[in-house]
Image: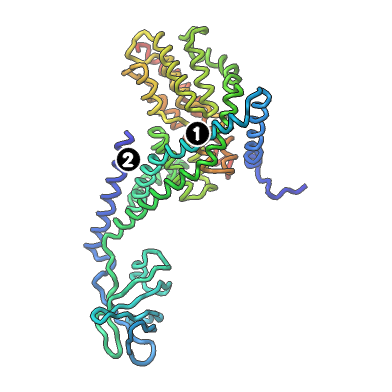
Amino acid sequence: MMNYLWGGLILISMLFAVGGDLYDISRDTYQNSEEYLLRPETGQLQVLNNQKLRLVLEAGDQPSIEAIYQTNGQRARLQLKYSDLYPEQWKHRFAGDRDKSIHATVVQVSTNELKVSLPGIVWHRLERMMQSAFDMAEFAAKLALGLIGLMALWLGLMKIAEHSGMVNALVRLIRPVLKKLFPEVPEDHPAMGAMTLNLSANMLGLGNAATPMGIKAMEYLQELNEHKDSASNSMCMFLALNTSSVQLLPPVTVIALLGVSAGGLFVSIFLATLCSTVVGVLAARWYARRQVTP
Amino acid sequence: MVCPQAGDPVNQIGIVVMPLLVAAIVAWGMWKRVAVYEVFVDGAKEGFDIAVRIIPYLVAILFAIAMFRASGAMEFLFSFIGPVFEWFGFPKELLPMAITRPLSGSGSLGVLADMVNTYGEDALVVKMAATLFGSTETTLYVLAVYFGAVNIRRTRYALQVGLMADAAGAIAAVIFCNLLFT
């Protein structure tokens, strides 16, 4: 399932970017072949290499453009810095980067005007997409490494909690509740013990410690199961509790990601998880009553 | 006494609960004669392992989401289904989280990280996403592991129940975050 979602995400993005770019090309959205006439702001145009020019765009009353004239004998170009005053078509060339400078190719020079063409924008969606994909890959590793400290802190604390018998304290609390939820399991059956331990560890966010216990519990439940290849009502109830499990503490990773501002989440996570558990339990009971034959 | 930083009760609980928790865990550990320092260090070692272990998952999901967003596909999708969900008061920014949460634990952690990065850690949608993340388990993974362990092929209604609980968790996350944080 995750495979389809992930693959689909990438393929759909690709289709969208290519489609958008093809649309831009066919409509010439960025007017790539357009040439612009520039006039000197004052006097005549005498261009030397690396000379700073003040120019005005011929069309309309555009404000002055500051550019550096560069030539290597055969090819002449203008180096343009970003300005808020440029027309929209020009601004697109900077791709939102105000520190970037672009080079306009000088097509023609005469004494009182300069004809230039701007660098074309093609496949810019694809380019931007790939750029942000690379950026994110870099960010992901930095993020994970940045989490080490906080994760270590909380995992250390949780280890203390584990060693000081917090799980056992919870077991005493939830055992009476479990008796009501699993009428098919005898009270002294080892399945009960394994389930209580698993759910207690889950409530404290000790996922790694919980899973082996949960598997053990499933094996015990399988002993009680009459149809060995089909899930029993107890199993479904157990998994309903497991997937929606009440969380007394936010997951370690959430605390690590959100830092101190995760504090308020203790309350919201507890309430939301209570809701999901109640819904899970009610749904499991409803199905168990409705589907008499397994 | 005027306390300008105090804020509402939920924030106060948030500020108080973490230091209290830290102190309580350590105090209880000492009461039970646990070698707190050594055990802490032992547990903290796992921090590095886990952080390194999640890197591939984070890269996979963050880069796919980045592509999806930069290509304009996300905007397109949101413009269609966003209004439907917003009409019910369900923020559209939360959809990626609600979809990935039952499927993949590390994947949804990536989504959460992406949201923190995009919207900032104090944004309401980020709190909702974190609440959603914390309130449910990776349903499909849990079913696969537990049923796989005892060779059960007919899972009957277990998946439906799990997904219903997930949906309830998502809705509850939106409601409670709206109540608590606004």
Q: Quadrant of the C terminus of chain A?
A: top left
Please indicate whether residue A196 sits to the left or right of residue A97 in the image.
right
**Residue A38, placed above or below residue B101:** below
View extreme (bottom): residue = A43
Q: Quadrant of residue B38?
A: top right
Residue B98 shows in this picture: no
- Mark 2 crowd level (few <14, some 14–19, many ≥20, 10 Å Cα): some
**Residue A109, placed above or below residue A195:** below
Q: Secondary structure at mark 1?
A: helix
- Chain to which the residue tagged by mark 2 belongs: A
Q: Quadrant of residue B84?
A: top left
Estimate the x, y position of residue B47 in percent, counting from the top left.
Answer: 50, 36
Estimate the x, y position of residue A181 in percent, counting from the top left.
Answer: 50, 15
Amino acid at the residue labelled 2? Trp
Q: Residue at x 64, y 41 (%)?
A: B15
- Mark 1 crowd level (few <14, some 14–19, many ≥20, 10 Å Cα): some
Q: Nearer the viewer, residue A226 or B84?
A: A226
Residue hosting label 2 = A6
Q: Residue at x 26, y 69 (%)?
A: A32
Q: Quadrant of residue A173?
A: top right
Residue A235 shows in this picture: yes
Amino acid at the residue labelled 1? Glu
Q: Nearer the viewer, residue B149 or A271?
A: B149
- Chain to which the residue tagged by mark 1 belongs: B
Q: Give me the disc on residue B46.
A: 1
Separation of marks 1 and 2 at Cα, in angstroms: 28 Å
